[in-house]
Image (cartoon, rainbow, N blue to C red):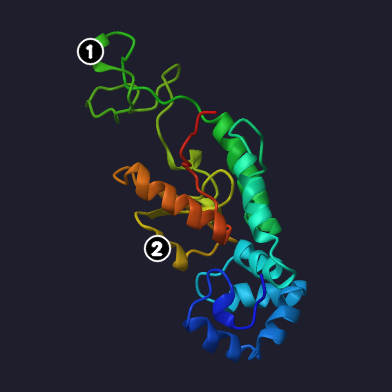
């Protein structure tokens, strides 16, 4: 595949021309040199809307003579049972330590059960705060089950983050992916999204290098 103009590149949009000019790339030859340079490639990914590592790689292949088709064919051969490493977030040391501390505290946290759950089956085990005026559990007597208290919480810095360290973002269409930062954010596809649209979102996320937390399970 010969690339003579920007529009010959897969996934290239009109708006990208101005965005490339803003970082000093105004010709096809300059873009060809930039995608071969790691630092420039990162700058392109950051500056261009909707362009991820895989798009830049496809441009590089196009400049080198059309390896894209071979790469796509190789991707088709990959089966669901083959392990592929998940995308990892870019975290600072403090966040990594906080996540590790949260995991430790989660393992130490007791199972909070409803008062007298063992006595009356109809109550169930789901936690409810004891409110009775004579409740020994509410009053903190010895040999009573533990109650939910603020001291059992995890570190505030990582509160609400996925165990992997990503910030979860709910999405319902592929257009929402352009606003996602793949370095610190991962997506969760809404439960009301159908299979057809879900596949489109997953394909677009793979192109942008975004991790999907509830990826559709495919049988071999």
Whichever of callouts 2 and 1 sits on the residue coming sooner in the sequence is 1
Pinpoint residue 181: horizontal percent, then vertical percent: 53, 64
Residue 71 badge: none
Q: How many marks?
A: 2
Look at discs 2 and 1 and give the one toward the viewer: 2
Q: Position of residue 98 (x, y in %)?
A: 62, 50
Q: Helix, strand, or loop for circle 1?
A: helix
Q: Which residue is mark 2?
A: 176
Q: Secondary structure at mark 2?
A: helix
Residue displayed at 34% across by 54% down: 172
In the figure, 40 relative to 98: above or below? below
Front residue (pair 143, 204): 204
Residue 207 rendering spot, x and y as whole percentages: 56, 59
Name the quarter where the C terminus is drawn.
Answer: top right
Left or right: where does residue 124 sit relative to residue 166? Answer: left
Left or right of 114? Residue 56 is: right
Front residue of this view, candidates 39 and 118: 39
Q: Are marks 2 and 1 in contact (CB under 8 Å)?
A: no
Q: Residue at x 51, y 50 (%)?
A: 161
Picture layout, residue 77 above or below residue 126: below
Q: Quadrant location of residue 126?
A: top left
Q: Going 52% across and 89% down the picture, which residue do you hit?
A: 18
Residue name at image x 40 percent, y 22 percent: 141
Image quadrant of residue 209?
Answer: bottom right
Give the quadrant of the N terminus. bottom right
Q: CA distance from mark 2 to mark 1?
A: 45 Å
User: 199 or 86, which is in the foreground?
Assistant: 199
**Badge 2: few (under 14), some or many (20 or more) residues near its Cα, within 10 Å?**
some
Q: Which residue in the protein does label 1 denote?
A: 122
Q: Measured from the top left, where is residue 93 in percent x and y?
A: 71, 57
Judge the density around disc 1: few (<14), some (14-19), many (≥20) Cα neighbours within 10 Å. Answer: few
């Amino acid at each position: 595949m010969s690339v003579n103009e920007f529009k010959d590149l897969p996934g290239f949009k009109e708006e990208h021309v101005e965005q490339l000019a803003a970082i000093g790339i105004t010709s096809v030859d300059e873009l060809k040199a930039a995608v071969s340079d790691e630092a420039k490639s990162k700058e392109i990914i950051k500056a261009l809307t909707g362009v991820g590592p895989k798009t830049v790689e496809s441009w590089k292949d196009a400049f080198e003579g059309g390896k894209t088709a071979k790469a796509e064919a190789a991707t088709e051969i990959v089966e669901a049972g083959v392990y592929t490493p998940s995308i990892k977030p870019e975290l600072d040391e403090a966040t990594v330590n906080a996540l590790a501390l949260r995991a430790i505290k989660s393992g130490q946290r007791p199972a909070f059960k409803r008062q007298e759950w063992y006595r009356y089956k109809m109550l169930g085990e789901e936690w409810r705060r004891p409110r009775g005026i004579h409740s020994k559990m509410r009053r903190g007597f010895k040999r009573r089950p533990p109650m939910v208290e603020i001291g059992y919480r995890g570190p505030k810095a990582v509160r609400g983050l996925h165990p992997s360290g990503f910030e979860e973002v709910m999405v319902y269409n592929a257009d929402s992916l352009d606003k996602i930062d793949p370095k610190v954010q991962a997506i969760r596809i809404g439960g009301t999204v159908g299979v057809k649209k879900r596949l489109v979102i997953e394909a677009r996320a793979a192109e942008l290098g975004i991790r999907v937390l509830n990826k559709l399970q495919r049988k071999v």
